[in-house]
Amino acid sequence: MKEERKQSHTYRKEKSLRKNPVSIRREMFNSENISREANEILEKFDDIAGNVRNLSGKQKISLYGAIKNLSHKLTDERNSRRLGYMNEASSISAYISYFMWWNLVRMTRLFANLPKISFNSLTKSENPVAIDIGSGTLTSVIALWLSRPELRSKKIKWYCMDLSQTALAAGEDLYLSIAAKKLSQIEEGQAWEIVRIKGALGTSIKEKADFITCANVFNEIIQNNEMPTDFLAKKYTNELLSYLKDDDSTVLLIEPGDPHSARFVTLMRDSLIKKDYLPVSPCPHAKTCPMSGRTNGKTVNSYGKNAKWCNFAFDTDSAPARLLKLSEKAGLPKERAGLSFILAQKSEQKETSRQNEKTFIRIASDFIRLPELHKSGYYACSQFGMLLAVDENHIQPRNGELLQIKTPENLTERDKKSGALIIHI
């Protein structure tokens, strides 16, 4: 039944493309862009982790309780947890078995669907250098290896930085175990070079990097910080950029899709733009973010009642079956996987306010029922601000999808609830 609905959806999509003004569609989390061999790794990641960690049958059974305990430490008990909690063997195994696995699912889908220019700083450099801040168990590095086969032949030197040497060591073992499987006929011994750095953001590294990643780090750094978040965004932007080469460098920040984290990503975006790093994804423009999550007693744009924050999500029904089963047994089922992120590249040219016949919009919600119109709609981001895209032609875009549409001639009608400009697609 589920497959029939999927086929019907595809048919409706193809049919609608022949008669609606949408000319380009690019999904954000399309799992079909992940190779078969990478999917096989994801499906059986628990076997790989168990072998690397040398877990006994008894230890595997005890994982369910350890995962639940670690979940408490990362959420409701995070203000009282010990700084070195990730040096504990039980915490590392629980983290890898559940949280890392889910993060790999999120990141591989995201990375596989980013435009090719996102990785120009790595592909164009003869000896590319990358830094992963707060690397933990090298989740970002492994996700990039799995999702971007064109990068596997590049001799990338990765500086992986974290406070926990235990986590870094476990992550390197996992990466080497996966790379050793010779994905896409990569020659043995041609894996990326991993340099472990014990330390936090600000720790000195002897080489300047072409590419820097920072995933699920700032939500922990800022949670107990009393300084204003806009001040922290400027401070940490300067610290990140101090690691990078002056030209053709790239910054990739990924955080959970909650309002607080998403707000901080938006502030980092603003700071990066002021330093001439223009957003490549998800933003279809470099103007003020219309989904900044800012309230301050007011709404983002002085219309409506609800401030929107920039985050994207997908259903987990196609996630690895073993991971879904593990999540159920641990009492932490997950129906949706989401995140907030910004990928920005150094550019000497400022974005101009050119008006073109075509414009890109980024879908930033699931479908919204519009009873008064007997139709559905979607919130979207654009150079004109936040949009409510009314789906006139049953396009049914997915959360996070990038659409190219004919630039609207009239942008005066606003949605009373959100204040978003109304367009029709």
Image: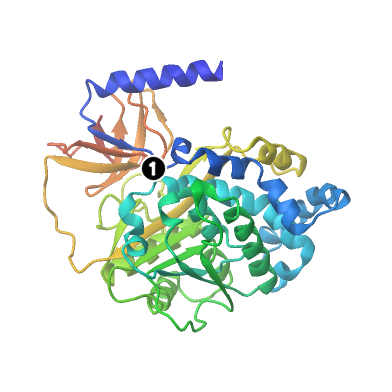
Residue 176 x %, y %: 61, 60
Label 1 Cα crowd, 10 Å radius (few <14 / some 14-19 / many 20+): many
Task: State which quadrant residue 20 falls in.
Answer: top left
Q: Is residue 331 above or below residue 13?
A: below
Under mark 1, the amino acid is: Ala
Residue at 67% of width from left, 38% of height from top? 324
**Residue 32 placement, left or right of 224:** left
Residue at 67% of width from left, 74% of height from top? 165
**Residue 272 placement, left or right of 56:** left
Disc 1 target residue: 364
Residue 152 x %, y %: 46, 56
Of residue 184 and residue 353, the one placed in the foreground of this image is 184
Residue 377 in sight in this render: yes
Residue 311 in sight in this render: no
Of residue 160 and residue 176, the one placed in the foreground of this image is 176
Residue 145 x %, y %: 50, 54
Task: State which quadrant residue 21 falls in.
Answer: top left
Of residue 7 and residue 356, the one placed in the foreground of this image is 7
